[in-house]
Amino acid sequence: MFKPDVIALGEPMVEFCAADTGRLSVVEVFKRGWGGDTSNFAVAAARLGAKAAHLCRLGDDEFGRSFMGLWASEGMDSSRVVVESGAWTAVYFISLVEGGGHDFTYYRAGSAASRYCVADLDEEYVASARVLHISGISMAVSVSLREAAFRAMELCGDAGGEVTFDVNMRAKLWPVDTAKRVLGRAFTKADTVFASMEDVRTLYGVTEPREAGELLRDMGVETVVIKHGGEGCYVSAGGESFTCPGFDVKAVDTTGSGDAFDGAWVAATLEGWSLERKAAFANAVGALTATGLGAVAPIPTREQALRLMEEQGRW
């Protein structure tokens, strides 16, 4: 039996990324890829050397089959994925704006992923993972997926595994008050929490990384990683806190950069790296992911990330 180092649970989505800058109404060419934050995370972890798996429901459609093909090509395990007959796999479109920014248009309501539930979990399999990764989007998509996510966190934590959690706040998916309540519960079950500055501004009105780190630590999180885009990240763990600067790259599309950052952090954690080196490696992977179009295609290999670190004097 494939015994994964890391399992991610959430919502995969097929991606259509605009080939040119502009509104969706004027762009004529799109590049089809893959997305969904936890899938992006798992692909990054696998590409960087971890034995990764993804848990979800997919539609029994061409887009669902494309995900199974992607995960197989990355050496991931998808044996516990539920393929639902008659269901469909969610999609989203990315429009690009100047400076590497992006806007999203989603078609996800009622997708197969939203119907994932506790009964779909292979509890022994989940408990075997060294790391389980969940996100705020996993919690927001549906109540049944949220309940499955919480059960998975309990299974992994009770078995001695590490639970990582990315806030990934999406105000379009749920009200802020609901998000704060659910996320507060998730923080009590997570060992490491990743959050962007946008996340903490939306949820708590916090505008400074150190303040955000202290807030989440006070909420019971052992290790807090505040992602700050091209500026790098702020890390607070135990009695240690520091800022790790970002890398100088030309951003084309930042879609999935934060997810790849998380995957890099977890891959480095599995290898026992220091906090400082993990942070630099994750920054490098996130930066390189922003240099190409789409969430998955630009995720670098381990060698590419280490080369960037060496070139810019960071190990």
Image (cartoon, rainbow, N blue to C red):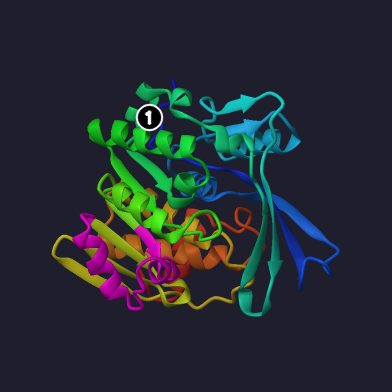
Residue span colored magenta: 194-222
The x and y percentages for residue 184 are 30, 53
The quadrant of the rendering that contains the C terminus is bottom left
The quadrant of the rendering that contains the N terminus is top left
Residue drawn 41% across and 32% down?
4
Is residue 293 or residue 56 the one in the foreground? 56
Residue drawn 23% across and 35% down?
160
Q: Is residue 53 visible?
A: no
The x and y percentages for residue 284 are 45, 66
Is residue 186 or residue 160 the one in the foreground? 186
The x and y percentages for residue 307 are 47, 65
Residue drawn 27% across and 67% down?
213
- Find out whether residue 207 is within the magenta segment: yes
Q: Quadrant of residue 74?
A: top right
Is residue 23 or residue 45 the one in the foreground? 23
Residue drawn 67% across and 38% down?
89
Is residue 215 or residue 172 the one in the foreground? 172
Direction left: furthest residue = 239
- Horizontal placement of 6 versus 273: left or right? right
Total tally of numbered discs in the picture = 1
Task: Assign a secondary structure to mark 1.
Answer: helix
Q: Quadrant of residue 154?
A: top left
Give the residue pinned by disc 1.
Answer: 126
- Horizontal placement of 230 versus 66: left or right? left
The x and y percentages for residue 210 are 27, 74
Q: How dense is the environment of label 1, judged by Cα within 10 Å: few (below 14), some, or many (20 and up)? A: many
Q: Is residue 280 above or below residue 92?
A: below
- Horizontal placement of 33 versus 223: left or right? right
Q: Is residue 192 visible?
A: yes
Looking at the magenta stretch, what is its main secondary structure? helix
Q: Is residue 155 above or below residue 166?
A: above
What amino acid is labelled 1 in the image? Val
